[in-house]
């Protein structure tokens, strides 16, 4: 609760086509300014929500990616997340 205070949120299944469409709609017509994700690089590409794909939907969008390891390292596709990273 402490890191999500005063935020609105929804849950979508990104593996389902309808879930992906909900996110795309939010990015194009939902007034989104920032897209933040914490997936491994290979997973976010597979979902079609990587930087290049999302940028085509909304050119003014700020794209933020949180990962435990540098995205150009050998460990890029290893799972890692901590509130202190």
Image (spheres, rainbow, N blue to C red):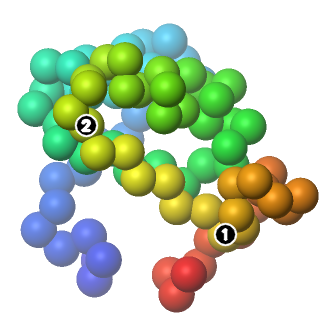
Q: What residue is drawn where x is 61% and y is 49%?
A: 39
Above or below, comparing residue 20 to residue 64 in the picture:
above
Q: Name the residue under label 1.
A: 68
Q: Give the Cα separation between the discs numbered 2 and 1.
A: 23 Å
Can you name the residue that lies furthest to the bottom here? 84
Label 2 SS: loop
Residue drawn at the location 28% of the way across and 83% of the way down:
2
User: Would you call the spot at circle 1 few (<14 residues within 10 Å), some (14-19), or many (20 or more)?
Assistant: some
- Choose top left, top right, bottom left or bottom right for residue 26: top left
Q: Which of 44 and 72 is in front in this view?
A: 72
- The residue sitting at 56% across, 22% down in the picture is 48
Residue that label 2 marks: 61
- In this rendering, which labeled residue sits more in front, label 2 or label 1? 2
Instruction: Please tell me which residue is depicted at 49% across the width and 26% down the height of the picture.
Output: 52
Q: Residues within 10 Å of mark 2 (few under 14, many from 20)?
A: some
Task: Decide which of 28, 51 is in the foreground and name it.
Answer: 51
């Amino acid at each position: 609760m402490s890191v999500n205070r005063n935020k609105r949120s929804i849950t979508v299944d990104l593996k389902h086509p309808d879930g992906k469409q909900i996110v795309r709609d939010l990015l194009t017509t939902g007034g989104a300014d920032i897209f933040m994700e914490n997936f491994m690089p290979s997973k976010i590409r597979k979902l079609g929500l990587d930087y290049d794909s999302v940028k085509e939907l909304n050119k003014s969008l700020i794209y933020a990616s949180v990962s435990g390891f540098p995205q150009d390292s050998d460990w890029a596709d290893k799972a890692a997340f901590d509130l202190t990273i």
